[in-house]
Structure formats: structure tokens, C-alpha cells
């Protein structure tokens, strides 16, 4: 987690002190050591044991484990209505009604049954680029392949390796109308590649092999929103 701005550096230094005082495994990086690894001048907060996962494979793994323990899975079954009773909840689908003691709604954005909660959320568009496989000479000039890099910009950027390719994500913005999304994706992913080349000049001139936008929502204060409703 790295920053080159005075405000971001102060923020990371406070975070470093708090983690160290709490006895957590954390280290700091700055000066030439930070520049060699990230191409940035400033301050870096280094934590260990982080990872990236393939969300699709992780979801399938969770589903297989749940099914092995007796869970029943029903895909492509749109819920038309949820009605609360005194002790139960009725879930109405096209095929019938399911009665349950509890229902868990796991959604990135409140569904129509929970419209009053929408004021607590903001819809956003994020942008991602994935480079082609990079030659060995370019890879040596990039960040180490075991490093997941995040900055303190608002919105922030993420960078990590997938095989011999670099994946870079950001900068997010408020969700756009459908008619404006294609143009915004071209502009924002071009901006991402430029910012990546400023950080690591060795990648200058490389065009992304894939570029796309990601629609998602977040809570207004950034804190996960969950609990009984």
C-alpha cells in the first residue's frame, strides 16, 4: 500500500504505527528500496500473507463444499416477492413458494424489496486492463511478481500479476448511463495504461490485450453494510 503524496504518506504512517502498536506483522518501505519495488517515491506499508483469488473458481468451490454437506442449490430461480410472516418468511418464485425461518439476501445493491436501503449505497463503474504476456526484459523492470500493489489515490488503483501479464484496476467513478459507458471505458482504460507507463516506463507503448468496465456498488461510508432488516 503505497503513496507519493504528503496526505497519503501521513495516512499510511499513522496506519503503520497503529498496526505496529497492535502487534500486527507489518513493515515500512521508503527511499530507494520502495522505488526499486514499485517505481514510487514516498512511503509504503508492507503486509504479508495477502492473496488474490479467482472469484468464479472460489464460488464454485464454496458451492461444491456446501452441496457435499447437504445444501440444496437452485440456480436461475428469480425471486418474485419476499413476504415476512410473524415466524417465517415466504419466498415466491415462478415455480412456487418456499417457506423458511430466515432468508439471507447477498447482493451488491439492494433489490426492489429493499429500496429504502438504497440511500446508503452508491453505484460505481470501475475499469480494468490486462496486458498481453510481457517479454522477460520488460517483466524485470516491473513490480515483483509476488507483489500486490495498491495506492492511496481516491479512487485508488490496484496492480498485480496474472502469469506473465499485469492486471491494473481503477480509477472508479460514479456509474454512467448505458449510452456513455463504451466511450468512458475507452477513455478510462487508456488513462490506466498511461498511468501504468508513468509508474513503470518499461511498459510504455504496450497496448492492453483486454480492457473492460465493472459495475458495482459500495456503501456511502465504505463500511460493509449487513444485519437484520
Image (cartoon, rainbow, N blue to C red):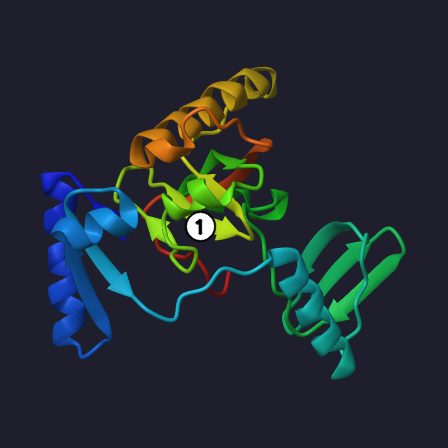
In front of the other: 199 or 119: 199
Q: Is residue 35 left or right of residue 133?
A: left
Which x, y percent locates residue 51? 45, 64
Q: Residue at the spot x=66%, y=57% of the render?
A: 56
Q: Is residue 97 above or below residue 9?
A: below
In front of the other: 181 or 174: 181
Q: Residue at the spot x=54%, y=30% of the render?
A: 208
Which x, y percent locates residue 176? 51, 23
In front of the other: 87 or 69: 69
Q: Residues within 10 Å of mark 1 (few under 14, many from 20)?
A: many
Q: Is residue 74 left or right of residue 3?
A: right
Which x, y percent locates residue 174? 43, 29
Residue at image mark 1: 160
Q: Is residue 220 above or below residue 205?
A: below
Is residue 8 something that shows in the picture? Answer: yes
Q: Residue at the spot x=62%, y=42% of the render?
A: 112
Q: Is residue 159 above or below residue 64?
A: above
Q: Secondary structure at mark 1?
A: strand
Q: Residue at the spot x=53%, y=20% of the render?
A: 186
Is residue 84 something that shows in the picture? Answer: no
Amino acid at each position: 500500500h503505497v503513496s507519493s503524496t504528503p496526505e497519503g504518506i501521513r495516512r499510511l504512517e499513522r496506519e503503520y504505527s497503529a498496526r505496529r502498536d497492535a502487534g500486527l506483522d507489518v513493515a515500512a518501505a521508503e527511499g530507494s528500496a520502495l522505488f526499486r519495488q514499485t517505481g514510487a517515491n514516498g512511503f509504503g506499508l508492507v503486509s504479508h500473507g495477502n492473496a488474490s483469488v479467482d472469484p468464479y473458481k472460489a464460488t464454485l468451490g464454496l458451492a461444491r463444499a456446501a452441496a457435499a454437506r447437504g445444501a440444496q442449490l437452485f440456480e436461475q430461480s428469480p425471486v418474485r416477492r419476499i413476504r415476512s410472516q410473524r415466524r417465517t418468511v415466504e419466498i415466491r418464485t415462478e415455480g412456487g413458494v418456499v417457506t423458511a425461518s430466515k432468508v439471507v439476501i447477498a447482493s451488491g445493491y439492494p433489490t426492489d424489496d429493499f429500496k429504502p436501503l438504497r440511500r446508503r449505497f452508491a453505484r460505481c463503474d470501475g475499469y480494468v486492463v490486462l496486458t498481453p504476456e510481457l517479454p522477460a526484459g520488460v517483466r524485470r523492470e516491473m513490480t515483483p511478481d509476488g507483489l500486490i500493489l495498491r495506492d492511496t489515490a481516491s479512487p485508488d488503483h490496484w496492480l498485480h500479476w496474472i502469469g506473465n501479464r499485469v492486471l491494473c484496476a481503477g480509477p472508479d467513478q460514479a456509474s454512467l448511463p448505458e449510452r456513455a459507458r463504451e466511450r468512458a471505458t475507452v477513455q478510462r482504460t487508456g488513462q490506466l495504461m498511461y498511468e501504468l507507463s508513468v509508474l513503470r516506463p518499461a511498459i510504455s507503448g504496450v497496448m492492453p490485450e483486454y480492457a473492460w468496465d465493472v459495475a458495482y456498488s459500495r456503501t456511502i461510508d465504505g463500511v460493509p453494510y449487513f444485519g437484520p432488516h
